[in-house]
Image (tube, rainbow, N blue to C red):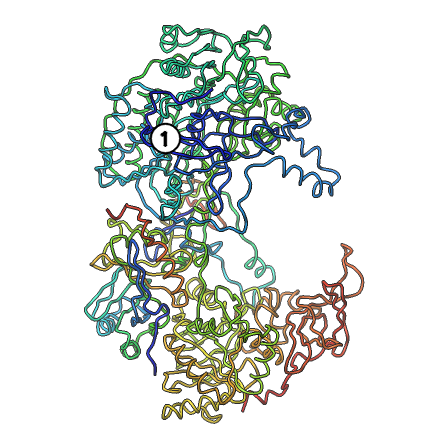
Amino acid sequence: MSTRLAKQGRLIDRSKQIDFTFNGKRMQGYAGDSLASALLANDQMMMGRSFKYHRPRGVVASGSEEPNALMQLGKGDRYEPNQRATTTELFSGLTAASQNHWPSLEFDVLSINNKLSRFLTAGFYYKMFIHPRPLWKHVYEPIIRKSAGLGEAPDKELKDADSYEHFYFFADVVVVGGGVAGLQAAKAAAASGAKVLVMEQNSHWGGRAPVDGGTIDGDTPDAWIEKILQELRGMANVTLRDRCMGSGVYDHGYVLGYERLTDHAPGQGGPRHRLWRVRASQIITATGAIERPLSFAGNDVPGVMLAASMRDYVVNWGVNPGQKVVVATNNDDAYRTALTLHEAGVEVVRVVDARDTGGGELMEAVREKGIRVELGRAIARVKDGPRVTKVAICAQNGEGGAQEEVEADAVAMSGGWSPVVHLWSHCGGKLTWDKEQAFFRPDPNRPPLGDNGAGFVVAAGSANGNLGLGAVLEDAAAAGSQAAEAAGFPAKSVAASKGVAEDEALMQPVWLMPAKADIKLRMKTWLDYQNDVKVSDVQLAAREGYESVEHTKRYTTLGMATDQGKLSNINGLAILADSLGAEIPQVGTTTFRPPYHPISMGAIGGEARGEIFQPVRKTPIYDWNDANGADWEPVGQWRRPFAYCRSGESRHDAVNREVKNTRENLGLLDASTLGKLIVKGPDAGKFLDMMYTNMMSTLKIGKCRYGLMCSENGFLSDDGVVARIDEDTWLCHTTTGGAESIHGHMEEWLQTEWWDWKVYVANVTEQYAQVAVVGPKARKVLEKLNNQAGGGMDLSKEALPFMEWRDGQIGGFNARAYRISFSGELSYEIAVAASEGQAFWDALMEAGKEFNVMPYGTETLHILRAEKGFIMIGDETDGTVIPQDLNLQWALSKKKEDYLGKRAHLRSHMADPDRWKLVGLETVDGSVLPDGAYAKGEGVNANGQQNVIGRVTSTYHSATLGRGIAMGLVKHGPKRMGEVIEFPGTDGKIYKAKIVDPVFYDKEGEKQNV
Amino acid sequence: MLILECPYCGVKAEETELASGGEAHLKRFGPGSDDEQFHDYLFMRENPKGVHFERWRHANGCGKWFHAARCTMTMEVFGTYAAQAYEPPQEIKDKITAKRPGWSWREFSDASE
Amino acid sequence: MSNPVTATNGAQFAGMATVADAGLQGMITLRGDLSSKVLAAAVKAATGAKVPAQRKIETSESGAAAWMSPDELLLLVPYEAAVATTAELAEALKGEHALTANVSDARSFFTISGEGARETLAKISPVDLSPEAFAPGDFRRSRTAQVAAAFWLEADGSLRLVCFRSVGAYMFNLLSNAAHPQSAVGVYQG
């Protein structure tokens, strides 16, 4: 059993007991515990079940590389699945539950899969479920989703109770990793004056050096760490962040830091996670190394752990993982675990060393303690079960025969170490195979390249393949100076602290234990714990022809779990290489991609949630609209009222009321969203003649003209009314969504093509609140305002005719009035300062009472314009429509030699007489055509689909006419007036509509010109 | 995520301040051009692995368009320069030649070849 | 004529920094040749300030001139004077190729003050806001979360920020959220 030791535990505070629950059971731990160490202290070795076979699994590691101990943490709006027990700090009231089991952790129905494992080999899903297709969706997938999987998704009705944020930071040197290497490198870099940021993923500094022992500058590692931290904290140019994982390295020195602020103290207030978006000149990856498991049968039975992790539990948290431990190794480091265990009073049953020649002084030290060390030996198998009970030992260089069985309740294994090269590799840093130590290490000659073409990442310490304490510190000091110099700070040589640790004998690569293990053993030998991939699976993939490591990975799912193969990667590669008869470096690694360790979606989203999920653009009249029944419609990032619904009124009824009232009395539209661009300069007329298809340079001062814009390839992109303000100034109205894009479009042509033309453009859209005063009584209400104010601009037909504008005062407001109409009614669009917009609107509503004034929304705007046959950008156009399609030839200047789109209109497809053209459509029965419906043509196309001859672009119920009206694009449409064509709806009905003139109302245009 | 120095305001802008604008130094063909010229102007674009010239706009900044010369493979930036140019400045071409001898891109190339 | 109002109408939030609607501010967009003496004189007359250098703001007792781009300034004048000053500028620049526009009502204007001001802004803008990199008199246009903004630092350490009026409410909420009292980062403040 695993228990809390009476002594040890450098990270825990035994005076602070903490209560928590696991699977509903109350347990106790101490402040400083990880959830994993606390569970072990409560003899909870089994922490979950595996993904595919539902095998019982215990904790293997002590850090972020842990593949098994995934937990569902918290409850309700703070619930989160798939959290590692090893990276979860214990806090009072923590609730954890294991996952992927049913009905309970101890008794799991689906562990039957374990018995069926013979059939669930690599590529099983691909092979089994490819045919017949329907079975996949209805049978296989639901079953697999239930049986294979991680934690349960949070309740979709609940919102995450926490908040998150980003933080932008800039540093000369970012050091990822706060172990002794990171601290030493930071010191060296900071000495040169460079601004240094150090990120450490844990809440404690120093990495594993204090556990591994040795001395630094004659001190214990703990004492040295304390001293250097104090030094660094005293430097103004150094920032230290703990609980902050360097999660990814991206182009041009961009690093993400994932800071976990309140995970260890939920509900304390403030953001839970902060994503540091850091730009660094140089990055030092001092990310350490990860121990590799050994591949023997039963290496996944709870109680089998990485040797150094077992040592962590004893030293850091005062937990012994078992009473009788077998240590299996191919290197010297695992002997430290044997010594640590022995010192803690744990019986080390045996050290099984696969090397015939054994180790160095560490082995001798172990032998001196009276511990039995066997050389050239291997673990043949660990007996299956919920906990280690028996371990069979055999010769390493055999097939697993002649086993000796010993009793034990835990196994410490060490297959050697792999430098954490992830962050080096994220942005293209290349690796080299170190044959002697059997690992990939960063190739200093091929680092990731920055914007200046030089390397911007330096690996340091064991992440750089230097494993001994002395070598780690020397390498780190050099890395620090190198990075600072590369960041532009004159190198200041800093003497590395002197690390002294035991000399170690060479490790010996052991990819399979025993070396010639038979198939029965190999089928129980796990490579990837989390995704349940075994040695036999990778060998099968190789036999089936998978040679590329990337393909094998996807076929077997090796390394594709949430741990991204931190433990399994090299062992899997080695098996694949062996199966292919190739060398490991020839097979190569899979691609390392960020993040190094999963980060929360909340951190990625940052502040963007709730009210500030995205900007909502508001007009000056927004609040009034909101308080007066506005049924909001998003138009780009703007919100515009679709209609103003009165209490108890449906949307449809509101729209009909607004349409009728505007035609009969007086309507007000908040038109502030329309884009307004000032174009000014001696060449402004010439420029606008290029921008618009029609002639703008000849427009008289005081007058307005409707203009069309096309892109260079001829398609309609925007429209609006242009007003000539003075000799060299025009004001261009754009569509609601178009202000920024058309402004950008104009600037683009001015800056990049006609840069010698003297034209300036300014976007003044938001300077004004613009109100369309529409209807037969429009003039009356404005004149009333002027009368009340004791005077104002002359708004008569004579003084301000249709399609002209004037500046002046209306009702005491400084205003510009445009006589333009998008409704066909008498209409004034009046612009006042945005800051006075609400007051102006209020004045209109008040004065308009006697004229039965009503505000109207975008749907009424649409219906009014459709009744008049006016096109709408985005309805009648979709990026493939040209002015000719909409019968707008009149707006294409023949006098101008050039304008954007002119040349494109000559292309054969644009001039094709078979293009669909705009017509009006009237349903035979007066109903409303479905939006976007296609008109049926003769026969079928090459794919056997119904041929179509047109489509509906706008369709409404016209309250004015009491029937459905629509516009559409129809092949040869204008020549087919009166013809009835069919539109199949998605509701299965066929809608019949007659082709008519698109102007349904006031064809002569008398009403707008009064 | 790239950083490019805006030649107009001197800001080393990260990509979220910028908007990319496609291939640089296109020659506009308007009325009077033949179909092939116009087609190529509208649609034909370089897609090199290596040296490339692009247009960018400091959209969330000073609003100016500029040119960038960079390597699409290594992300190395050889330089940025004004939008008001028909071809890359000699200084940038020299810099590319020094780093990528023998380079060529459309009508431009290593002049030492 | 009524009392003009800002988009956020005097809103305030006090957290690790104080975020406040800075009220109505006269603002004039001026585009033209920034090296022109005529323009410099006109700017001086309008604001009392000289033409700023690249990415700088020049302040005087009555106004300020900020560098927006190589051919654009943002002039700050009293709100009441904006219409008249815009007209005077246009008159003064008559012979020049220039554009002036009163944009006072097109903007929202905020102050971010207190010890946490830099950190508040650094949460939403990809700009180095450390004291070494951003000092009083510096002026920067950039992105704040999902919208464009311009900001500068006053001599007293408080920040001024200008954005479009339509996103004034978004900006106020964004800044208030970033200034959450328990969210100090601790890199630019004690």
Q: Identify residue type, mark 1.
A: Tyr
**Residue C23 in the image: above or below residue A309:** below
Tell me if I can see residue A255 in this picture: no
Q: Where does the image place residue A327, in percent across and percent down from the top left?
A: 46, 14
- Left or right: residue A46 versus residue C96 is right
Q: Which chain hosts label 1?
A: A
Tell me if I can see residue A878 in this picture: yes
Mark 1 Cα within 10 Å, few/some/many (few <14, many 20+)? many
Tally of numbered tags: 1
| Quadrant in which the C terminus of chain A appears | bottom right
- Left or right: residue A964 versus residue A337 is right
- Left or right: residue A450 versus residue A49 is left
**Residue A308 in the image: above or below residue A669:** above
Q: Residue at x 40, y 93 (%)?
A: A787
**Residue C187 in the image: above or below residue C45:** above
Q: Where does the image place residue A493, in percent across and percent down from the top left?
A: 23, 29
Q: Where does the image place residue A343, in percent across and percent down from the top left?
A: 36, 14
- Left or right: residue A356 versus residue A207 is right
Q: Where does the image place residue A552, in percent across and percent down from the top left?
A: 60, 29
Observer-nearest of C28 and A376: A376
**Residue A173 in the image: above or below residue A783:** above
Observer-nearest of A346 and A989: A346
Disc 1 is placed on an element classified as: strand
Observer-nearest of A597 and B34: A597
Residue that mark 1 sits on: A30
Q: State the residue lying farthest toward the front.
A: A26
Q: State the residue lying farthest toward the right.
A: A939
* Rendering quarter of residue A808: bottom left
